[in-house]
Image: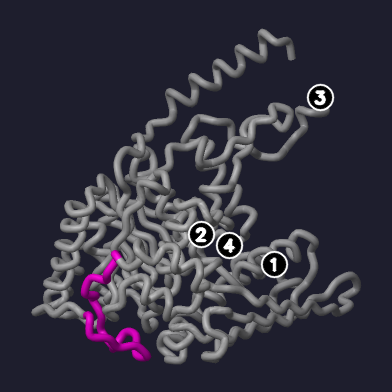
Amino acid sequence: MPMRQHAEKNKTKKSSQESNADIQAAKGKLGIMIPGMGAVATTFVAGVEAIRKGFAKPIGSLTQMGTIRLGKRTDARSPKISEFLPLAGLKDLVFTGWDIFEDDMYTAASKAGVLEGELLKKVKPFLSSIKPRKAVFDHNYVKKLDGSNVKKGKNKMDLAEQVRADIQEFKKSSGASRLVMIWCGSTEIFLTQTAAHQSVKAFEKALTRNDESIAPSMIYAYAALMESVPFANGAPNLTVDLPVMQALSRQNNAPICGKDFKTGQTLIKTILAPGFKARMLGLNGWFSTNILGNRDGEVLEDPGSFKTKEESKLSVLEHILQPELYPELYGHFTHKVRINYYPPRGDNKEGWDNIDIFGWLSYPMQIKVDFLCRDSILAAPIVLDLVLFLDLAKRSSELQGLGIQEWLSFYFKSPMTAPGLYPEHDLFIQSMKLKNTLRHLKGEELITHLGLEYYD
């Protein structure tokens, strides 16, 4: 391409960006509010402070380390995502949280046992300054835990109003100009939608009468959305998969996403299963078992909480492999998931997978995976990316009123979608969806990887 034509093309692209990128600047502080100040939350906050101080790197974070290709491969344009988009800077993040235990974040992080003592000492002053607010908690929804740092109220609506007051107070005391809430609390018992979840009016009436179909996580979500605060659900709880929450999200321009952070075993499934389907390799069975010894493992000892987690983990393969389209390959496979609480392992979870596949002429093969992962280490960068991307969505005129942010499916085991739309679980399609959304926001050409133009 002649130099002049190339320059004209770039000039056109720049003006296209300027005209399409209706995103408010990330001015001022961004307040991060976290229900559940356990292993994931403390690892996330300690990591942010360590990175800010310059003695750690944000490994695993797309917003901090990832790049995004723009234009053709021959254009050689691949800026960092943090430079391409007006994301909040780490220096502007401020934190608060709620927990049923009174431990400050340093004490909670020490007990969680994820991070080494030397690193924790370096961020101790900062972590010690973050003390938990009294939590909304009901033992009936998380039967393996109990604590005394709990809010009291005449009914669930009163508790929701107390959380709204916490949100307002934190915004004022921290000086934050914008807020995001992300659930890092425990897995609640399995719940299904009821009449109480169908509208704002029905939900608020149910709050006042202490309806048992309203779990604590829903109270946090309701409070956040009523305050126009974006909300992400990091657990497999029903929380925002409800018509009432989706209505509030759109009504108050408060983006939502979830559910259940995609960290260990499910991450591996969403990498391997698309490969099997791409090569038309059949599946007879996939057996998964886990041992972990953190608070999450203890909570999942309860059958009600395990049922919630199991539903989230089991849905992945069925959606990726599409057995209705490929009955000969995936119409009859067995999928089993087991989770065992084993205290000596702590946060260092181990996931074993036995995968029985078959190939040409139906000949059988096996794959064994032993993933010795660190659950909170994998979850922390997910939390960072989600809060920064939700804040971006809140500042985007195009995204803020959509409600569900399906482009953030990349980070979840059970991605949210519009009602009636099946979720996309393939990690690589999710990655493409996320990056194409970012390109779209900035008026850049979407990447299809067709590539025929190189051979004209």
123, 38: nearer the viewer? 123
Q: Disc 3 and disc 1: Cα gap in Å?
A: 35 Å
Which residue is tagged 2?
Answer: 381
- Kindly identify which numbered label has been placed on residue 456: 3
- Res 107 seen here: yes
Which segment did they paint magenta?
129-149
Q: Residue type at mark 2: give it.
A: Pro
Q: What is the crowding at mark 4: few (fewer than 14 residues within 10 Å), some, or many (at least 20)?
A: many
Residue contact between numbered discs 4 and 1, judged by CB atoms under 8 Å = yes
Q: In this view, does 32 lie above or below 393?
A: below
Name the image quarter holding residue 220. Answer: bottom left
Badge 1: how crowded within 10 Å, few (<14), some, or many (20+)? many
Q: In the structure shown, which secondary structural element does the residue marked by tag 2 occupy?
A: helix
Principal secondary structure, stretch drawn in magenta: loop
* Disc 4: which residue: 425
Upstream in the sequence, badge 1 or badge 2?
1
Please tell me in which quadrant of the rendered image residue 131 appears: bottom left
- Answer whether residue 238 is visible to the viewer in this image: no
Which quadrant would the C terminus be assigned to in this image? top right
Question: Of helix, strand and loop, which one carries label 1?
Answer: helix
Checking the image for residue 134, the label placed there is none
Mark 3 residue type: Asp
Where does residue 193 sit, x and y in percent of width and height?
Answer: 33, 74
Number of other residues with Cα within 10 Å of mark 2, as a class: few under 14, some 14 to 19, many 20 or more: many
In the rendered image, the quadrant that contains the N terminus is top right
Closer to the camera: disc 2 or disc 3? 2
